[in-house]
Amino acid sequence: MKKNFLLVLITFFATIASAADLTIIVTSLPPDTPPDEGVFVAGNFNGWNPGDANYQLATNSNGEPQVIISASGQIAFKFTRGSWETVEGNENGGFLPDRTFMMGSADTLEVTILSWEDQGGTVHTAAENVVVMDEEFYMPQFNRHRRIWLYLPPGYDTSGKSYPVLYMHDGQNLFDIATAFAGEWEVDEALNQLAADGKQVPIVVGIDNGGSYRIDEYTPWANPQYGGGAGDLYAHFIVETLKPYIDQHYRTLPDRDNTGVMGSSLGGLISHYIGLKYQNVFSKAGIFSPSYWFNDSVYDFSYLAGAQHPMRLYIMGGTAESGGLVQQLNKMKDTLVAAGFRPDQLMLKVVEGGQHNEALWRSQFSAAYQWLFPEYSSAIYESLNPHKPTLQVMANNVMFTDPTGATDTFDLMVYSLSGQLLLTRKMATEKIYRLPQIAPGIYLVRAVYNDGIISRKAFLY
C-alpha cells in the first residue's frame, strides 16, 4: 500500500513539475477590431471555449494585450472575440489553422492577429453556382433566423429539369473557406467535378449552424454535461418549413426517393435522427463521425423507429477520432439490422487514420453521395441537342441511335439498383436488341459509347 501511495505521489509531483506558464503577447491587432469587444484565447487547455473569461486578454504595462496560460505538453489554440463566429483568420480573412506551441520551450510568445473571419475575408472559394438563398431565413420553430446556402447543378438555369435535393447542416463549412470554421467540405468542387465527368448531381441546401445554438439544435436528447435536446424542433423546421419552401421555389424532385440529409459530428447525429424519424420524407442519410456518445437514447430510438421504408444509410468515421467511435458505429449497425434494415441498405465505412475534421469529411463526400444516389448519380446529363444519341428501352427491347453517325457500336450494360452488373454486350447502333429473360423489376440500363454514357432506369420483365 505504501509503495502504491508513493508511486501516486511521485506521479502527481512529476505532473506539476511538467506544467509551465506561458505569457502570450499580441503585438498587433487587425485595424477593424471593435474597440468595445474583448479578445480571448481558446485551446485544448480550456475545452476550446471561445469566450472563457479566464482566458480574456488584458493590457500589460506596455499597452499590449496579453494572456497567461498554465499547461503542459503541446497546446493548440486560436484567438476569438468571444465566439467561433469571430475567430481569427489568415491574411485574407479566411481559415487559419490552429496555432501550436510546446510548453516549456519558452516563457513568452509574441504573436500577430492578422484578421477576423467575420470582418469579411477577401478570399472566397464558393463556386459560381453556389448562392446564398437567404441571409435571414425565418425559423418559426425557434423564432430566430438562419443563413441558407444553395448549390445549383451546372446548367440549372437553362436545363428546365427537376433535381433531387440533399439537405446538409453546418452550411458555413460546406462551400466557402472564408466562412468555414476549420476548413471547408468543398461540396461544390466535388459535385462540379462529378458533373464534368458526366454524373448527375443534385441541388444541395446548406443550413448554417446557429453558433451557440448548435448543440441544442443538433441533439434530439439532452446530455447531462452539455445540455441540448431541441433537435426534434430543428427536424420540424427542415420538414415543415424549409423543404416546402425549397420545393415551391426551385425545380426539385420532392418525393422521398429523391431527398436526402447529411452532416458530421453532431450534424451526423441529427442527420441520423431526421432520416429515421421522417422515413416518409427522406430515403437517404449521410452520417459522418456521428456523436452517438451524446446520449444512448439514439440506440433505443433507432431500434423502435425500425425499417418503415427502403432506406440508404451511409455511416462513416475514422480510427483517429474519439476512442469509442468505431465501436459505436458497429453497435449502431447491429442495432439497425436488428430493427429490420437489410445489410445492403447500410454502408459502414471506417477510414484508417481519419480524424474528426473537415479534411476527413471532405475526402469522403463524393463517394458517399454516389452511394446514396446510385441511380441518379450514375446517369449522364441530358443534352438539349435534338440530334444527340439516344437510348430507348421499351419492355425488354433496347435500341441505341446516334443521329450524328459517329457511333457504330456501343456497350450495353444492365445493373441492379444495388449496383450489381448483370449483363454486358457489345451492340450495333440502330438495331433493336431484346434483353434475355430477367426477373421482373426496375433496373439501370446503360449505353457506353465513344463520346459518353447514357443511362435509363426502366422496368424490365
Image (tube, rainbow, N blue to C red):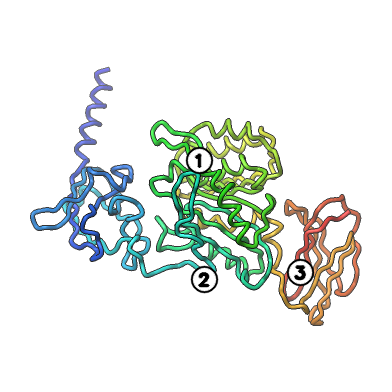
Residue 343 quadrant: top right
Question: Which kind of residue does numbered mark 3 sit on?
Answer: Val
Quick one: label 3, few (<14), some, or many (20+) residues within 10 Å? some
Q: Nearer the viewer, residue 335 or 237?
A: 237
Percent across and percent down for residue 34 are: 24, 59
**Image check: 397 left or right of 391?**
right
Q: Quadrant of the N terminus?
A: top left
CA distance separating discs 1 and 2: 32 Å
Residue at image point 19% right, 53% down: 24
The numbered dot on residue 231 is 1
- Against 168, residue 219 (above or below) is above
Give the structural element (helix, strand or loop) at label 1. helix
Looking at the image, can residue 196 be seen?
Answer: no
Give the structural element (helix, strand or loop) at label 2. loop
CA distance separating discs 1 and 3: 45 Å
Contact flag, marks 3 and 2 (Cβ < 8 Å):
no
- Against 326, residue 203 (above or below) is below
Q: Which residue was labeled with disc 2?
A: 128
The numbered dot on residue 448 is 3
Residue at image point 78% right, 75% down: 389
Between circles 3 and 2, the one closer to the viewer is 2
**Image check: 299 left or right of 283?**
left
Question: Which kind of residue does numbered mark 2 sit on?
Answer: Glu
Residue placed furthest toward the top: 1
Residue 73 quadrant: top left
Q: Which of the marked residues, 1 or 2, is nearer the chain's N terminus? A: 2
Percent across and percent down for residue 300 are: 58, 30
CA distance separating discs 3 and 2: 31 Å
